[in-house]
Amino acid sequence: MKKVFLILGLLVLGVVGYFVWMLATTTSHSPADTISVNLNDTDVSISYCRPYKKGRVIFGELVPYNT
């Protein structure tokens, strides 16, 4: 019975370790950003993910003008 718990524990530890490693080594395709403003003594904050341009021309090529 102890061997079963040991094997399950090692398996869970391996899976968790793998996910932590993946989060630490992969880059985000849409990095998080935040903007804050104070309006009439009220703090407004918006958190969002902004996509990378990745060297592309967005307006005029990827998104045609006048559409």
Image: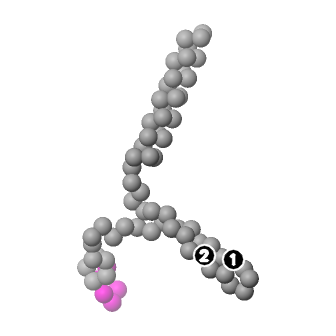
Amino acid bearing label 2: Ser
What's the CA distance linking mark 1 and mark 2? 7 Å
Asked whether the residues under the numbered discs 1 and 2 touch, taking CB atoms below 8 Å apart as contact, a structural biologist would say: yes
Which is more N-terminal, label 2 or label 1?
2
Q: Residue at x 56, y 74 (%)?
A: 35
Residue 17 placement, left or right of 41: left
Please state the extent of the stretch shown in magenta in the rendering. Answer: 63-67
Q: Residue furthest right?
A: 41
Residue 58, picture quadrant: bottom left
According to the picture, the residue beneath numbered tag 2 turns out to be 36
Residue 47, picture quadrant: bottom right
Q: Circle 1: is it few (<14), some (14-19), or many (20+) Cα within 10 Å?
A: few
Residue 11, position as x, y percentages in the image: 49, 25
Q: Residue 25: within the magenta?
A: no
Numbered tag placed on residue 10 in the rendering: none
Residue 22, position as x, y percentages in the image: 42, 43
